Image (tube, rainbow, N blue to C red):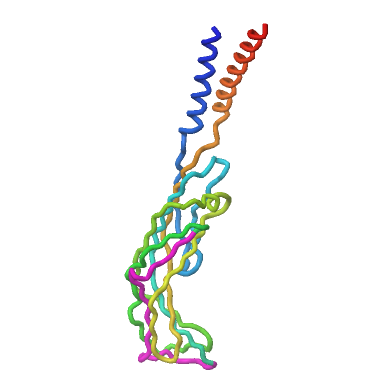
């Protein structure tokens, strides 16, 4: 009888430990990227990981950007300037312009898409003093990132949504009495997959407690028998 109880107690502990260690979970969220510009923070609708579910062990992020470049003629004079048909501006990106996406201490790079506003000529617009004339190009292109988190799991755990940092160079050109510039408007979709070790269910704890209790009882009886 003593051997049977010991065996049952051992089986209970093994089963509970198996449930604790082998039952990893995966949770995936799909969302969108709020309209933003390259070089600024990119807010998504992806929620951070809820620590009440367990311990985070892995993160996989996918960001599918749609990039639309824009060019800007900025008037830095103290008087209005006219953007004449002989003036032009442009903004372009190509794969040699490496972009950086970051979250917490995680950082990833990706090649920029081949996309450009093309040459945009003036048409007599009046640009007031110290303001910019922003013109959006007619082309857009995808720039997609899929990457795994490093070790900064704590940054993904908490309340709120995931917000990524972006940086990236472009090629800007202009003629006329303006300072030129440009950038890329970003929209798109996003997803995140969390791998985690779940908090053990109450039944698992009960099973383990029963097993440990059984072993302790058998050890106490054995000790009493030896003392007697």
Residue 48: image x %, image y %?
Answer: 53, 51
Q: In the figure, 55 relative to 212: above or below?
A: below
- Compare residues 120 and 221 and report the one nearer the observer: 221
Q: Nearer the viewer, residue 104 or 221?
A: 221
Q: Nearer the viewer, residue 139 or 126?
A: 139
Q: Determine whether, in the image, residue 214 is placed left or right of residue 24.
A: right
Position of the N terminus by quadrant: top right
* Residue 137 coordinates in the image, percent (x, y): 37, 75
Instruction: Spot the residue most to the bottom.
Output: 79
In this view, 74 is above or below 32: below
Q: Is residue 77 magenta?
A: no
Residue 115: x %, y % from top left: 33, 71
Residue 165 screen position, x and y as percent:
49, 63
Figure quadrant of the C terminus = top right
Residue occupying image coordinates x 43% and y 74%: 183
Residue drawn at x 52%, y 50% as measured from the top left: 153
In screen coordinates, is 225 left or right of 116?
right
- Would residue 89 be counted in the magenta stretch? yes
Q: Which residues are magenta?
A: 78-102
């Amino acid at each position: 009888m003593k051997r049977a109880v010991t065996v049952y107690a051992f089986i209970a502990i093994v089963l509970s430990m198996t449930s604790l260690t082998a039952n990893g979970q995966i949770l995936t969220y799909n969302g969108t990227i709020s309209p933003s510009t390259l070089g600024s923070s990119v807010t998504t609708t992806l929620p951070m990981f809820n620590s009440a579910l367990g311990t985070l062990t892995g993160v996989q992020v996918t960001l599918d950007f749609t990039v639309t470049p824009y060019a800007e003629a900025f008037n830095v004079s103290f008087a209005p300037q006219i953007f004449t048909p002989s003036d032009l501006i442009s903004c372009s990106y190509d794969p040699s312009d490496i972009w950086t996406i970051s979250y917490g201490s995680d950082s990833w790079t990706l090649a920029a898409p081949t996309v450009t506003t093309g040459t945009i000529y003036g048409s007599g617009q009046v640009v007031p003093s110290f303001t910019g004339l922003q013109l959006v190009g007619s082309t857009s292109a995808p720039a997609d990132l899929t990457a795994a988190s490093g070790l900064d799991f704590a940054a993904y755990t908490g309340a709120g949504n995931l917000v990524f940092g972006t940086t990236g160079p472009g090629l800007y050109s202009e003629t006329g009495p303006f300072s030129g510039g440009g950038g890329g408007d970003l929209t798109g979709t996003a997803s995140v997959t969390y791998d985690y070790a779940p908090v053990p269910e109450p039944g698992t704890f009960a099973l383990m407690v029963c097993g440990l209790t059984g072993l302790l009882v058998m050890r106490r009886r054995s000790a009493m028998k030896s003392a007697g």
